[in-house]
Image: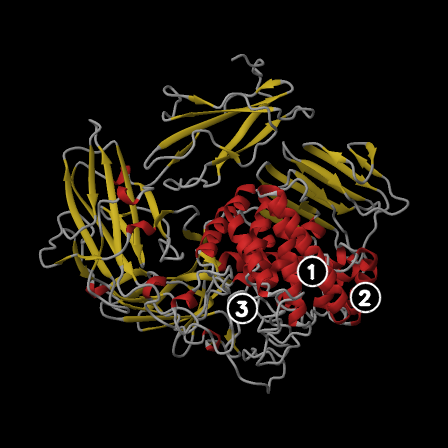
Amino acid sequence: MSNPAQISDELTRVLILKSQHGDLIGTIGDPLELSWQIATTRVAASQIGYQIQMSPSPDFSADVSDSGVNLSAEQVGVIAPGGTFSSRERRHYRVRVQTEFGWSAWSSPISAEAGLLSEEDWVGDFIGDEGRVGSPSPTLRYEFELPEKPTSARLYVSSMGLNEVQINGLEVSDGLLNPGWTVYQERLLVDTHDVTSLIVAGPNAISAELSDGWWRGRFGFKNRSENYGTEIGLIAQLELVMADGSLVTIASNDAWKVDTGEILASSIYDGSTVDQTKEHIGWRLPGFDDSSWAAASVKPQAKSVLKPRTTAPVRVIAQFPMGIEPQEDRTLLRSSQNISGWVRLTVDGQKGQRVTVRHAEVLEPGDKLHTKALRTAKATDVYVLGRDGRQVLEPRFTFHGFQYADVVTDAVVISAEAIAISSDNERRGHLVTSDTRLNRLHDNVLWSQYDNFVSLPTDCPQRDERLGWTGDAQAFAAASNTLLNTQAFWRSWLIDLELDQYENGDVGAVVPDLLKLDPNGEIGDWILEGRAGWADAATIVPMSLYEYFADKSVLSAQLNSMRRWTDALHNRRKGEKFLPTEFQFGDWCDPDAPGDRPWESKVSADFVANAFFAHTADLMAQAESLVGTTENAAKYGAMAGQLKLDIWNHMGAEARTTTAGCAMALEFGIVPDEERMSLAAHLSDMVIADDGKITTGFLGTPLILHALSKNGHASSAYKMLMRRDFRSWLYAVDKGATTMWERWDAIREDGSIHSGDMDTNPEGQEDASMISFNHYAYGAVVDWMYRNVGGLAPVNESPGYRLISVAPIPAEGLAFASTSIETGFGKAALNWELNSQGELAARLEIPFGSQARLCLPVTTESKIFCNGSEVANGDLLAHGTHQIRLTKPAVVQYL
């Protein structure tokens, strides 16, 4: 095969080659996708081809497979050659690219390794003790001896319940709350660990502790225990490759020993109780005398549910020092940030002393913890010291949503840190402006995402809920994909969404769906499956992944699920124009809804249901045109078109009376084109009449700013964004919030804390059922901020930031904004400022493989200059760094 000459000075080079699984091993269960980022000093260069090589050898010295030259500009989500992996298979990949100037050098290689992909690969059993829910944590151990150190060692591990595993006293992973929460009855994740460095010649010991976790711990709407089973158990398989190529397998079975130790109780809601006096000293090390321990009991559990992990585990992501404030009967700990995690406490005490730590998000007046919002969650960690002297205390198998904590103990509190945890998704977006309040709002949204993305997208991290609400997920999907690289995170959750989908195609209000496990699962008169704006996560989340990551494969994977949900909506009509009138969440938490009926929003629930139906049918048509059939694309497109027409003709007049109705009609294309400008102006007038006050709930709020700015009313959008009085995003910032609130007035203007009902009258119903200071749904606003304040956004016609919209909207009081997004192609960045000459000056960075379309805020007198030459709005800019100058820009006035 003859190729153009390679560029000897490497003016073009592949900087990064990666897969959709990042640095995980043992994750390969679906086709591997490769992406690469390219750097070049040649402005005119573009990728015209690529070549991928694969080898089982890391230096590509043997058995090299070659893709050949592919004449394509694709560099994101390219299917790797080699087809389906077999269990334990390891492959190494490298890529080089062809431009008009020749070939690059080969990239640095990446490795991919499959875990145990077949039920038959497992030779061990699930093992544990005879304890039941709330029992002390089982401790498991097994010793083995090796004549030499192995050349390679892999540990495959999962559990019913949570597990922590060590080899020779050393943790096998920094992952937490493993294996996470999935639809356990169908999918139990397996972690694969390279433990070669932990194994030694001679005696070795593998040990593990288990906890109830989500499997059988108290969890869900009704605080039921044993949702998935009455027993917990570990399955582990350690495979050692020796120098002569032989394989030694150590698997969990009844030859392992079991006892209980220092963890007397561990609950995600309630916390952890650790009695260090009950610890078996040295039990994790070889040579420990376990003769008094019982034989582990084998647990009945199908191995067919064992599936490879395909997304990053939960890890520690940050640490915050906590202030120590001695009180009369306790020590108050204060952090600068509301987090999900726990307190790492250093004390100086005596053996047998008790240390109790209780957590809360906010303080009552007078520096008392506000715990009413926790409902029944105790959020309390208890320790009994096992020795004299200074020691560090941390809980196990739990996490809390908190910024403050009380410590009650006779020991001396030396120091404290707030340990923040989250699913380890890489940071993607950065936005800093000249307005410190907007910067704090941005960071509040980011932290609410961190705090609620703990294994799955939860609604809150503190009270006795923490469920994967589908409505919150779809509302926040775009913002989440802007802030963090959540591609693998959402893909994993969508697998569970489909697994939990009802036979008729309905999708639950929460995923995993605990209600399906309870024969009396419905809550009062609420029907929680197939609800508008919640079940639509089945279509909205996959399409968001396509828009922000150019992820077409997720559409292929979810296409059947998307069809089933869309068809379920169609079938529910039973030949009528509209969905039947029935319970809906509606524009949930409309701030004007009755206190005890938060689903009774101002906008009609029937309008909301049918509007989201039309939107889902629209998305379905798009997905079909991309990865499905032209017949289905036409079918769903016609369904959406007719439904929109009928909605507007029969419900449009009523929808016009509410801000949420107007926003949905505009954003979902329900309003006819000839009436769009009139409706947008009407919405703007309502916003101005309300002085920018937020009058929408969970479904309307993520849409309203887009509905305004896309239709010529950026001033009204800014009026809402920049409002500081009650019912605004910045109200919470001014009140000192470090995360997003569930309610706009969670802390009232007089400093009192909302009781939990929807009534803003302090004398209203005392109902603590819904009050959270860490709820990401309203943080959807951050996507609007990146697009309009920061000025960067993906374009649907060429998704994943292959085509980037450059459309900042400067407003009075904003002197500058600095924005960057780590796209699949590399970093896209825009830094703009209003300079002393009254111009908008900007520096735009476009990664190789992307183009940018200018859509700058021009007036009739404006001129645009790029790198010294005059250009026009709509022009496309190639990769590289560009200096842009806009004379006489339009600056939004919103006061």
Left or right, 845 with respect to 450, comes to right
Which residue occupies 55% across, 14% down? 3
Left or right, 725 with respect to 840, comes to left
96 to 571, vertically: above or below: above
Q: Position of residue 721 (x, y in %)?
A: 71, 62
- In the image, which disc is placed on residue 761? none
Q: Furthest residue to the front?
A: 575
| Residue matched to label 3 | 773
- In the image, which disc is placed on residue 682? 2
The image quadrant that residue 646 belongs to is bottom right
Question: As shown in the figure, which amino acid type bears the numbered disc 2?
Answer: His
Asked whether 804 or 530 is in front, the reply is: 530
Q: Position of residue 644 (x, y in %)?
A: 71, 60
> What kind of element bears circle 3?
loop
* Foreground: disc 1 or disc 2: 1
Question: As shown in the figure, which amino acid type bears the numbered disc 1?
Answer: Leu
Q: Position of residue 230 (x, y in %)?
A: 27, 66
Q: Is residue 659 visible?
A: yes
| Residue matched to label 1 | 643
